Image (cartoon, rainbow, N blue to C red):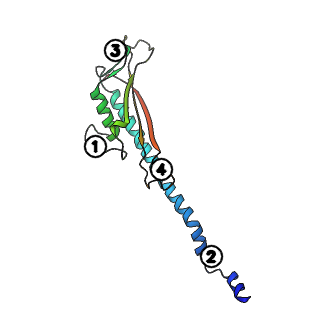
Amino acid sequence: MTVARRFLNCTSGAAAAEMALILPLAVLMLFTTLEAGHWMYAQHQVVKGLRDGARYAARQSFDDVNCRGGSPTISNSVIDATREITRTGQLSGGNPRVAGWDAADITVTATCPVSAEAQTGIFDAGEPAPQVNVSTTTAYNSLFNGLGVITDSVNLVGEQQAVVMGI
């Protein structure tokens, strides 16, 4: 009876037992926080790239991006350069802002306003200024291969628009 009473009153392993119970939850919270921070950083890089790409495409001439004849046209050289600026921040030879982000994941299109007021100045009164749309959907490369929290099935998505200035 005294051995059982001594055993029940012994607290020498209480801290180790509590640590064993709390450690898995603490590690899960740590990895979740790091993974969420990495996802937010990657999403920010995608949005930043799309903004740079739209800004670059909006500063092209009306010969390259226009609404002549009522349908939008955009030259292939502008599309390729916009994709590269969006993805790497450079016209050629840069590293992707986000690992695994390919130029094929980036869509560059132009749209023409259905109705626009007659413009004066840099816009021709008979031709409305086109709008450039840059968008992407790319797979998120998980920092810790998910560990059951954020898997590689999560995508980074973004879209940006800018009106062409015809500079």
Q: Which amino acid does the dot numbered 4 rest on?
A: Thr
SS at circle 3: helix
Q: Which amino acid does the dot numbered 3 rest on?
A: Arg
User: Rounded to the nearest whole Å, what is the CA distance between mark 1 and mark 4?
Assistant: 27 Å
Report crowding for label 4: few under 14, some 14 to 19, many 20 or more residues within 10 A (C-alpha). Answer: some
Indicate which label's residue lies in the foreground, 2 or 4.
4
SS at circle 2: helix
Give the quarter of the image for residue 75. Answer: top left
Q: Earlier in the sequence, mark 3 or mark 2?
A: 2
* Tag 4 near tag 3, CB within 8 Å: no
Q: Which amino acid does the dot numbered 2 rest on?
A: Ala
Q: Earlier in the sequence, mark 1 or mark 2?
A: 2
What residue lies at 44% left-to-right and 36% top-to-bottom? 158
User: Rounded to the nearest whole Å, what is the CA distance between mark 2 and mark 4?
Assistant: 36 Å
SS at circle 1: loop
Disc 4: which residue: 151
The label shown at residue 68 is 3
Q: Earlier in the sequence, mark 4 or mark 3?
A: 3
Viewport quadrant of the N terminus: bottom right
Q: Is residue 78 above or below residue 30?
A: above
Judge from the rendering whether residue 27 lies leftward or rightward of residue 98; answer left or right. Answer: right
SS at circle 4: loop
Disc 2: which residue: 14
Indicate which label's residue lies in the foreground, 4 or 3.
4
Q: Is residue 11 above or below residue 139?
A: below
Judge from the rendering whether residue 4 lies leftward or rightward of residue 119; answer left or right. Answer: right
User: Rounded to the nearest whole Å, what is the CA distance between mark 1 and mark 2?
Assistant: 55 Å
Give the quarter of the image for residue 145. Answer: bottom left
Q: Is residue 30 above or below residue 75?
A: below
Q: Which amino acid does the dot numbered 1 rest on?
A: Gly
* Tag 1 near tag 3, CB within 8 Å: no
